[in-house]
Amino acid sequence: MSTLTLASKRRRAALRNLAFLSPWLIGFAVFFAYPLVSTVYFSFMHYDGFRPPTWSGTKNWTYVFEHYPLFWPALRNTLWLVLVMVSLRVVFGLGVGLLITKIKTGTGVFRTLFYLPYLAPPVAATMAFAFLLNPGTGPVNSILEKVGINAPGWFNDPSWSKPALTLLALWGIGDLMVIFMAALLDVPTEQYEAAELDGASAWQRFRYVTLPNISPIVMFAVVTGVIQTMQYYTQPLIAGKVASGVIQGAGTQFEPGYPDKSTLTLPQLVYNLGFQRFDYGSACVVALVLFALSTVFTAFLMRRRGGLIQAGD
Amino acid sequence: MTHVLDQPAGATAAVTPAGRAARRRAVLEWIAVHSLGLAAALFFVLPFVFVFLTSLMSDTQALSRDLVPHTWEWANYKKVFDTPGFLTWWKNTLLYAGAGTVLTVVSSLPVAYALAKFRFRGRNLALMLVISMMMLPPQVVIIPMYLFWAKQLGLSGTLWPLIIPMAFGDAFSIFLLRQFLTTIPNEYVDAARVDGCGDLRTLLRVVVPMAKPGIAAVALFQFFYAWNDYFGPQIYASENPGAWTLSYGLESFKGAHHTDWNLTMAATVLVMAPVILVFFFAQKAFVEGVTLTGVKG
């Protein structure tokens, strides 16, 4: 060992780092950097996958923003989902997390039951909800009507399809429940005891002790919720497909968004433009809009490093 | 309040009026909390129950608004298994999920180890890029990726475009493993080095045994990811039913069986069941993993 000079030692360390990182370095180049650059390139090209790509300037961009009939509805739906679905999920997740920390009998059973729906594969869970909420034979509407409530059309009604998706998202609250539960158990008990001695009510203890302690986790839940909403694809697509009754692979093409564009999200547009209309250029424009939006929120998440990255060594 | 605190703890507290009031409040709170818990449990469990009950109904009853089957048609499950393709979808799903999980763990572990334990310039940048990749919606790069796999390599109609990339590290797995590895004290790594272990030996002999829960969590997440993936098979495998996975095939099931909710729900149960079974065997590792991604250590 003593014969090794400092320089060669350093070279060896660099080689070692390179060797350990190599799978990811290749993956980064081939599956991230190259396709990202290529997406930008194609967004300025006219390309249908058969004839060679030709330069089309900003045509794809003006098409998507001004003429593509699905773009703005998809963006509006995304905004709705961010405002309603994400906030309800955070509030409900915190509520269920609080509840589980208060449950003293059968805690393990309750926790497992609350957690299970999160595990249901999205396609299966969406099919299940499409059945449960179907206006014809669905058990939910049967029960509602027995009680005398005028049952909505859920996935078949443009103004109820997003609330139905929200219900599905609340059912799968397990991930947030676990995260909030861990955060709630981390709140120092002395602070609660001190507040109780000062005569604080339950609400005051929640407002002045619990909330300040878990606010980084609430923030984390909101931002990751927004990022997940940008990627929201399988559930709205399957819900629309099943409710519309279009048969896959029977020569008919499913125009996403059923009913009346109300379940459109941005990722579905990439599929619609690229793989149904064979307009790869415009699909890349939507992909870049999606990229810009998710990057903004990812950057926001990374700035609050404390919540996401623990100091390594 | 101070009354209660002044009392010696135990039975005597209940005798005083203040103690009795406190106790009654505790009982009432117990009842309130647990009734709320039961209501929530119904919300989470009833969908499973209705799906399962419907999967056992006869064809005609599935068209009615009944909630409970008159006759229990277990043969529905056999019918689902006999559907052409169903067993192929199972096989494909196991291949995608199984091979994908092994490849992901093997390729992500050294990267995560380097990011957690080596010191080098650009490490923070690398970590930030890993997180960016993790947060990237797959649709952003799908057009060039599809052209690459389908037009240049001719691999459309197979699951290889989904499996091969997993040999090159998965961002989420790298991130989660790195979070876990940073919790292993450096002294263990240093001690192994002093004993003359090379870096690879240290990783395999010292770090891996200590990181088993983290590795288990990553493996589970990756398995579930592949099992649940709809977009990937839709892009690459849709043209060839012989390459479909369960998550992708399930939806075509509804199309083929139109209004037969009973068979569709039986198929749904069969897609959900393995995931839930796996979860029961590995509950601890899984929940640990969920917490690890969200909460600072």
Image (cartoon, grey):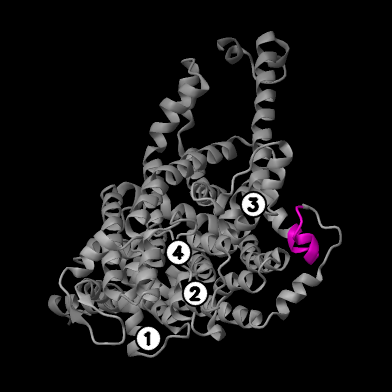
In the picture, residue A67 is in which quadrant? bottom left
Where residue B166 appears, x then y in whole percent? 41, 77
Q: Toward the viewer: A133 or B7? A: A133
Q: Quadrant of the C terminus of chain A?
A: bottom left
Co-location on one chain, circles 3 and 4: yes
Q: Nearer the viewer, mark 4 or mark 1?
A: 4
Three-letter code, disc 4: Pro
| Residue pointed to by mark 3 | A135
As measured in the structure, the alpha-carbon distance from the residue carrying label 3 to the one carrying label 1 is: 41 Å
Q: Is residue A27 visible?
A: no
| Residue pointed to by mark 2 | B101
In magenta stretch: residue B58: yes
| Residue pointed to by mark 1 | B150
Element under label 1?
A: helix
As measured in the structure, the alpha-carbon distance from the residue carrying label 4 to the one carrying label 1 is: 24 Å
As measured in the structure, the alpha-carbon distance from the residue carrying label 3 to the one carrying label 4 is: 21 Å
Where residue A226 appears, x then y in whole percent? 37, 50
| Residue pointed to by mark 4 | A256
Three-letter code, disc 3: Pro
The span picked out in magenta is B53-65
Co-location on one chain, circles 4 and 1: no
